Amino acid sequence: EAKRRRAGWLAYDPRFDHGSAATLTLLGEMRRALQRQELRLFVQPKLHLLDGTLVGAEALVRWQHPERGLVPPLEFIPFAEETGFIHELSLWVIDEAARLLARWGPIGLLPRLSVNLSVHDLMKADLVTQLAARLQHHGASPQALCLEITESAIMNDPQRALQTLQALKALGCKLSIDDFGTGYSSYATLRNLPVDELKIDMSFVRAMEKVPKDAMIVRSIIEVAHNLNLSVVAEGVENEAIWQQLATLGCDEAQGWHIGRPMPVESFEAWARERAAA
Ligand code: C2E
Ligand code: CA
Ligand code: CA
Ligand code: CA
Protein backbone atom coordinates (compact mmCIF):
# COMPACT_ATOMS: atom_id res chain seq x y z
CA GLU A 1 0.00 0.00 0.00
CA ALA A 2 2.78 2.41 0.96
CA LYS A 3 4.55 1.66 -2.30
CA ARG A 4 1.43 2.26 -4.35
CA ARG A 5 0.89 5.60 -2.63
CA ARG A 6 4.47 6.62 -3.32
CA ALA A 7 4.23 5.78 -6.97
CA GLY A 8 0.96 7.64 -7.22
CA TRP A 9 1.70 10.92 -5.51
CA LEU A 10 3.29 12.63 -8.49
CA ALA A 11 0.20 12.02 -10.56
CA TYR A 12 -1.90 13.67 -7.92
CA ASP A 13 -5.60 13.23 -8.49
CA PRO A 14 -7.57 16.37 -7.56
CA ARG A 15 -10.57 14.22 -6.69
CA PHE A 16 -8.63 12.90 -3.70
CA ASP A 17 -10.44 13.25 -0.43
CA HIS A 18 -8.84 16.09 1.55
CA GLY A 19 -8.54 13.97 4.68
CA SER A 20 -7.21 10.86 2.92
CA ALA A 21 -3.97 9.30 4.10
CA ALA A 22 -2.24 9.91 0.78
CA THR A 23 -3.12 13.60 0.86
CA LEU A 24 -1.93 14.04 4.43
CA THR A 25 1.33 12.23 3.68
CA LEU A 26 2.08 14.43 0.72
CA LEU A 27 1.11 17.59 2.57
CA GLY A 28 3.48 16.67 5.39
CA GLU A 29 6.19 16.03 2.86
CA MET A 30 5.68 19.47 1.30
CA ARG A 31 5.83 21.17 4.71
CA ARG A 32 9.09 19.37 5.46
CA ALA A 33 10.40 20.37 2.04
CA LEU A 34 10.03 24.02 3.02
CA GLN A 35 11.68 23.50 6.41
CA ARG A 36 14.53 21.45 4.92
CA GLN A 37 15.03 23.98 2.15
CA GLU A 38 14.38 21.53 -0.65
CA LEU A 39 12.51 24.07 -2.76
CA ARG A 40 14.62 25.91 -5.33
CA LEU A 41 13.99 28.97 -7.45
CA PHE A 42 15.18 28.66 -11.01
CA VAL A 43 15.54 31.86 -13.01
CA GLN A 44 14.88 32.35 -16.73
CA PRO A 45 16.04 35.50 -18.55
CA LYS A 46 13.81 37.86 -20.54
CA LEU A 47 15.34 40.05 -23.26
CA HIS A 48 14.26 43.20 -25.07
CA LEU A 49 13.56 42.26 -28.69
CA LEU A 50 14.99 45.43 -30.22
CA ASP A 51 18.43 45.55 -28.65
CA GLY A 52 18.76 42.24 -26.78
CA THR A 53 19.26 43.85 -23.35
CA LEU A 54 18.41 41.82 -20.26
CA VAL A 55 15.19 43.43 -19.05
CA GLY A 56 14.11 40.91 -16.45
CA ALA A 57 13.70 37.29 -15.48
CA GLU A 58 11.03 34.89 -14.28
CA ALA A 59 11.39 32.91 -11.06
CA LEU A 60 10.15 29.32 -11.44
CA VAL A 61 10.00 26.94 -8.50
CA ARG A 62 11.32 23.35 -8.41
CA TRP A 63 11.48 20.74 -5.68
CA GLN A 64 14.90 19.19 -5.14
CA HIS A 65 13.61 15.98 -3.63
CA PRO A 66 16.17 13.77 -1.81
CA GLU A 67 14.96 10.60 -3.55
CA ARG A 68 12.95 11.73 -6.53
CA GLY A 69 15.39 14.30 -7.88
CA LEU A 70 14.34 17.61 -9.36
CA VAL A 71 10.52 17.68 -9.43
CA PRO A 72 8.91 20.15 -11.90
CA PRO A 73 6.27 22.59 -10.60
CA LEU A 74 3.33 21.12 -12.50
CA GLU A 75 3.75 17.95 -10.41
CA PHE A 76 3.19 19.70 -7.07
CA ILE A 77 1.66 23.17 -7.64
CA PRO A 78 -1.83 21.75 -8.39
CA PHE A 79 -1.61 19.75 -5.16
CA ALA A 80 -0.39 22.79 -3.24
CA GLU A 81 -3.38 24.73 -4.59
CA GLU A 82 -5.81 21.97 -3.74
CA THR A 83 -4.65 21.79 -0.11
CA GLY A 84 -4.11 25.50 0.52
CA PHE A 85 -0.36 24.94 0.96
CA ILE A 86 0.10 27.33 -1.98
CA HIS A 87 -0.02 30.33 0.42
CA GLU A 88 3.10 29.20 2.25
CA LEU A 89 4.73 28.30 -1.03
CA SER A 90 3.95 31.66 -2.66
CA LEU A 91 5.27 33.58 0.34
CA TRP A 92 8.47 31.53 0.21
CA VAL A 93 8.83 32.36 -3.50
CA ILE A 94 8.20 36.06 -2.83
CA ASP A 95 10.74 36.06 0.01
CA GLU A 96 13.39 34.42 -2.19
CA ALA A 97 12.64 36.81 -5.04
CA ALA A 98 13.01 39.81 -2.71
CA ARG A 99 16.34 38.46 -1.48
CA LEU A 100 17.59 38.06 -5.06
CA LEU A 101 16.38 41.52 -6.08
CA ALA A 102 18.18 43.11 -3.13
CA ARG A 103 21.34 41.31 -4.25
CA TRP A 104 21.06 41.94 -8.00
CA GLY A 105 19.38 45.33 -8.21
CA PRO A 106 22.12 47.52 -6.69
CA ILE A 107 24.92 45.90 -8.76
CA GLY A 108 22.91 46.30 -11.98
CA LEU A 109 22.78 42.58 -12.67
CA LEU A 110 18.99 42.36 -13.02
CA PRO A 111 16.45 45.20 -13.09
CA ARG A 112 13.30 43.15 -12.52
CA LEU A 113 12.15 39.72 -11.38
CA SER A 114 8.72 38.17 -12.07
CA VAL A 115 7.01 35.64 -9.83
CA ASN A 116 3.84 33.63 -10.45
CA LEU A 117 0.82 34.07 -8.22
CA SER A 118 -1.96 31.50 -8.06
CA VAL A 119 -5.69 32.15 -8.05
CA HIS A 120 -5.75 31.41 -4.31
CA ASP A 121 -3.19 34.13 -3.58
CA LEU A 122 -5.51 36.71 -5.15
CA MET A 123 -8.25 35.73 -2.67
CA LYS A 124 -6.00 35.92 0.40
CA ALA A 125 -6.70 39.11 2.33
CA ASP A 126 -3.21 39.57 3.79
CA LEU A 127 -1.20 38.76 0.65
CA VAL A 128 -0.26 42.36 -0.04
CA THR A 129 0.78 43.12 3.57
CA GLN A 130 2.90 39.98 3.68
CA LEU A 131 4.47 40.76 0.32
CA ALA A 132 5.28 44.33 1.34
CA ALA A 133 6.85 43.12 4.60
CA ARG A 134 9.12 40.71 2.75
CA LEU A 135 10.28 43.31 0.24
CA GLN A 136 11.05 45.68 3.09
CA HIS A 137 12.82 43.02 5.13
CA HIS A 138 15.30 42.42 2.30
CA GLY A 139 15.47 46.02 1.21
CA ALA A 140 14.11 45.29 -2.28
CA SER A 141 12.21 47.88 -4.31
CA PRO A 142 8.55 47.03 -5.09
CA GLN A 143 9.06 48.49 -8.57
CA ALA A 144 11.53 45.69 -9.30
CA LEU A 145 9.00 42.96 -8.56
CA CYS A 146 6.51 41.86 -11.21
CA LEU A 147 3.59 39.58 -10.39
CA GLU A 148 2.39 37.23 -13.13
CA ILE A 149 -1.25 36.28 -12.87
CA THR A 150 -3.04 34.06 -15.38
CA GLU A 151 -6.04 35.28 -17.26
CA SER A 152 -8.11 32.43 -15.82
CA ALA A 153 -7.10 33.28 -12.22
CA ILE A 154 -8.39 36.82 -12.72
CA MET A 155 -11.60 35.71 -14.43
CA ASN A 156 -12.36 33.29 -11.58
CA ASP A 157 -13.51 36.26 -9.49
CA PRO A 158 -12.78 39.52 -11.33
CA GLN A 159 -14.01 41.75 -8.48
CA ARG A 160 -11.80 40.21 -5.80
CA ALA A 161 -8.89 39.99 -8.22
CA LEU A 162 -9.23 43.66 -9.07
CA GLN A 163 -8.99 44.65 -5.40
CA THR A 164 -5.79 42.67 -4.91
CA LEU A 165 -4.29 43.93 -8.16
CA GLN A 166 -5.04 47.54 -7.22
CA ALA A 167 -3.36 47.08 -3.84
CA LEU A 168 -0.28 45.53 -5.45
CA LYS A 169 -0.21 48.35 -7.96
CA ALA A 170 -0.48 50.97 -5.19
CA LEU A 171 2.54 49.38 -3.55
CA GLY A 172 4.47 49.97 -6.78
CA CYS A 173 4.70 46.43 -8.14
CA LYS A 174 4.42 45.65 -11.84
CA LEU A 175 1.59 43.37 -13.00
CA SER A 176 1.54 40.94 -15.90
CA ILE A 177 -1.24 38.80 -17.34
CA ASP A 178 0.23 35.36 -17.93
CA ASP A 179 -0.83 32.78 -20.53
CA PHE A 180 -2.69 35.49 -22.38
CA GLY A 181 -4.92 34.27 -25.20
CA THR A 182 -6.01 31.06 -23.45
CA GLY A 183 -8.79 32.61 -21.37
CA TYR A 184 -11.77 34.79 -22.03
CA SER A 185 -10.88 38.32 -21.02
CA SER A 186 -12.54 41.01 -23.06
CA TYR A 187 -11.38 44.51 -23.91
CA ALA A 188 -13.69 45.66 -21.12
CA THR A 189 -11.94 43.57 -18.45
CA LEU A 190 -8.50 44.46 -19.75
CA ARG A 191 -9.33 48.15 -19.71
CA ASN A 192 -10.28 48.00 -16.04
CA LEU A 193 -7.26 46.02 -14.85
CA PRO A 194 -4.23 48.00 -13.61
CA VAL A 195 -1.76 45.79 -15.52
CA ASP A 196 1.49 46.73 -17.26
CA GLU A 197 2.14 43.71 -19.44
CA LEU A 198 0.54 40.93 -21.46
CA LYS A 199 2.42 37.67 -21.77
CA ILE A 200 1.45 35.74 -24.90
CA ASP A 201 0.88 32.08 -24.12
CA MET A 202 3.58 29.88 -25.59
CA SER A 203 1.05 27.64 -27.33
CA PHE A 204 0.73 30.44 -29.93
CA VAL A 205 4.44 31.22 -30.06
CA ARG A 206 6.23 27.89 -30.20
CA ALA A 207 5.24 27.01 -33.77
CA MET A 208 4.39 30.45 -35.15
CA GLU A 209 7.11 30.28 -37.82
CA LYS A 210 5.36 27.21 -39.27
CA VAL A 211 1.68 27.83 -38.50
CA PRO A 212 0.29 31.00 -40.11
CA LYS A 213 -2.80 30.99 -37.89
CA ASP A 214 -0.61 31.08 -34.77
CA ALA A 215 1.37 33.98 -36.21
CA MET A 216 -1.87 35.83 -36.88
CA ILE A 217 -2.99 35.35 -33.27
CA VAL A 218 0.36 36.59 -31.98
CA ARG A 219 0.10 39.61 -34.26
CA SER A 220 -3.41 40.41 -32.97
CA ILE A 221 -2.38 40.11 -29.32
CA ILE A 222 0.55 42.48 -29.89
CA GLU A 223 -1.86 44.94 -31.48
CA VAL A 224 -4.36 44.68 -28.60
CA ALA A 225 -1.56 45.16 -26.05
CA HIS A 226 -0.15 48.21 -27.79
CA ASN A 227 -3.60 49.75 -28.29
CA LEU A 228 -4.08 49.50 -24.53
CA ASN A 229 -0.59 50.89 -23.86
CA LEU A 230 0.66 47.61 -22.45
CA SER A 231 4.04 46.06 -22.97
CA VAL A 232 3.93 42.61 -24.59
CA VAL A 233 6.13 39.58 -23.93
CA ALA A 234 6.29 36.34 -25.89
CA GLU A 235 7.16 33.16 -24.00
CA GLY A 236 8.31 29.90 -25.59
CA VAL A 237 10.75 31.50 -28.03
CA GLU A 238 12.63 28.40 -29.09
CA ASN A 239 14.56 29.48 -32.19
CA GLU A 240 16.03 32.40 -34.13
CA ALA A 241 13.23 32.38 -36.75
CA ILE A 242 10.61 33.02 -34.06
CA TRP A 243 12.77 35.73 -32.48
CA GLN A 244 13.05 37.49 -35.86
CA GLN A 245 9.36 37.19 -36.60
CA LEU A 246 8.43 38.64 -33.20
CA ALA A 247 10.83 41.53 -33.75
CA THR A 248 9.20 42.24 -37.10
CA LEU A 249 5.74 42.19 -35.48
CA GLY A 250 6.89 44.75 -32.90
CA CYS A 251 6.73 42.50 -29.84
CA ASP A 252 8.59 44.15 -26.94
CA GLU A 253 10.22 41.31 -25.02
CA ALA A 254 11.01 37.61 -25.40
CA GLN A 255 11.60 34.66 -23.13
CA GLY A 256 12.41 31.07 -24.06
CA TRP A 257 14.97 28.35 -24.60
CA HIS A 258 16.52 30.21 -27.54
CA ILE A 259 17.62 32.86 -25.05
CA GLY A 260 18.15 30.74 -21.97
CA ARG A 261 16.54 27.93 -20.01
CA PRO A 262 15.43 28.38 -16.41
CA MET A 263 18.70 28.11 -14.45
CA PRO A 264 19.72 27.68 -10.82
CA VAL A 265 20.46 31.04 -9.19
CA GLU A 266 24.27 30.68 -9.32
CA SER A 267 24.20 29.71 -13.02
CA PHE A 268 21.94 32.62 -13.85
CA GLU A 269 24.28 35.00 -12.09
CA ALA A 270 27.24 33.64 -14.10
CA TRP A 271 25.20 33.82 -17.33
CA ALA A 272 24.23 37.45 -16.73
CA ARG A 273 27.80 38.48 -15.83
CA GLU A 274 29.16 36.83 -18.96
CA ARG A 275 26.61 38.65 -21.12
CA ALA A 276 27.37 41.98 -19.48
CA ALA A 277 31.10 41.46 -20.12
CA ALA A 278 30.66 40.43 -23.78
P1 C2E B 1 4.36 29.49 -16.72
O1 C2E B 1 4.26 30.56 -15.69
O2 C2E B 1 3.59 29.66 -17.98
O3 C2E B 1 5.93 29.32 -16.98
C1 C2E B 1 6.48 29.05 -18.23
C2 C2E B 1 6.89 27.61 -18.37
O4 C2E B 1 7.42 27.39 -19.67
C3 C2E B 1 8.01 27.17 -17.41
O5 C2E B 1 7.77 25.83 -17.08
C4 C2E B 1 9.25 27.29 -18.30
O6 C2E B 1 10.31 26.47 -17.87
C5 C2E B 1 8.72 26.84 -19.62
N1 C2E B 1 9.47 27.39 -20.75
C6 C2E B 1 10.20 28.51 -20.79
N2 C2E B 1 10.71 28.73 -22.03
C7 C2E B 1 10.28 27.70 -22.80
C8 C2E B 1 10.47 27.35 -24.19
O7 C2E B 1 11.14 28.03 -24.96
N3 C2E B 1 9.85 26.22 -24.61
C9 C2E B 1 9.10 25.43 -23.80
N4 C2E B 1 8.56 24.34 -24.31
N5 C2E B 1 8.92 25.73 -22.49
C10 C2E B 1 9.50 26.84 -22.00
P2 C2E B 1 7.91 25.29 -15.60
O8 C2E B 1 9.08 25.92 -14.92
O9 C2E B 1 7.83 23.80 -15.67
O10 C2E B 1 6.61 25.86 -14.91
C11 C2E B 1 5.35 25.41 -15.30
C12 C2E B 1 4.26 26.21 -14.65
O11 C2E B 1 4.25 26.01 -13.23
C13 C2E B 1 4.40 27.72 -14.83
O12 C2E B 1 3.92 28.07 -16.10
C14 C2E B 1 3.54 28.21 -13.70
O13 C2E B 1 2.19 28.19 -14.04
C15 C2E B 1 3.78 27.17 -12.63
N6 C2E B 1 4.77 27.67 -11.67
C16 C2E B 1 6.12 27.62 -11.73
N7 C2E B 1 6.67 28.21 -10.66
C17 C2E B 1 5.65 28.67 -9.90
C18 C2E B 1 5.56 29.38 -8.65
O14 C2E B 1 6.56 29.74 -8.02
N8 C2E B 1 4.29 29.66 -8.19
C19 C2E B 1 3.17 29.29 -8.87
N9 C2E B 1 1.98 29.63 -8.36
N10 C2E B 1 3.23 28.64 -10.03
C20 C2E B 1 4.44 28.33 -10.55
CA1 CA C 1 4.55 32.72 -15.68
CA1 CA D 1 2.99 31.49 -19.12
CA1 CA E 1 1.45 28.35 -18.27
Image (tube, grey):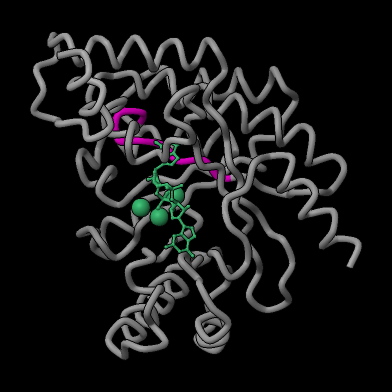
- Tell me the quarter of the image containing the N terminus: top left
Instruction: Tell me, yes or no, whether the highlighted magenta stretch contains residue 141.
Output: no
- The answer to whether residue 181 is left or right of residue 265 is left
x then y, percent, for residue 45: 63, 56
Q: Does residue 36 lie above or below 121 as drawn? A: above
The residue depicted at 19 percent of the width and 15 percent of the height is 22
Q: Does residue 275 lie above or below 165 as drawn? A: below
The residue depicted at 34 percent of the width and 41 percent of the height is 74
- Tell me the quarter of the image containing the C terminus: bottom right
65 and 230: which is toward the camera:
65
x then y, percent, for residue 42: 58, 41
x then y, percent, for residue 182: 25, 61
The residue depicted at 45 percent of the width and 10 percent of the height is 32
Q: Which residues are magenta?
A: 114-121
Quadrant of residue 264 within the rendered picture = top right
- The answer to whether residue 250 is left or right of residue 122 is right
Report the number of discs: 0
Quadrant of residue 84 within the rendered picture = top left
62 and 90: which is toward the camera:
62
213 and 36: which is toward the camera:
36
x then y, percent, for residue 259: 62, 67
Instruction: Tell me, yes or no, whether the highlighted magenta stretch contains residue 120.
Output: yes
- The answer to whether residue 112 is left or right of residue 64 is right
Quadrant of residue 228 within the rendered picture = bottom left
Q: Does residue 50 lie above or below 171 as drawn? A: below
Q: Does residue 153 lie above or below 90 as drawn? A: below
Q: Residue furthest right?
A: 277
274 and 186: which is toward the camera:
274
The residue depicted at 49 percent of the width and 47 percent of the height is 175
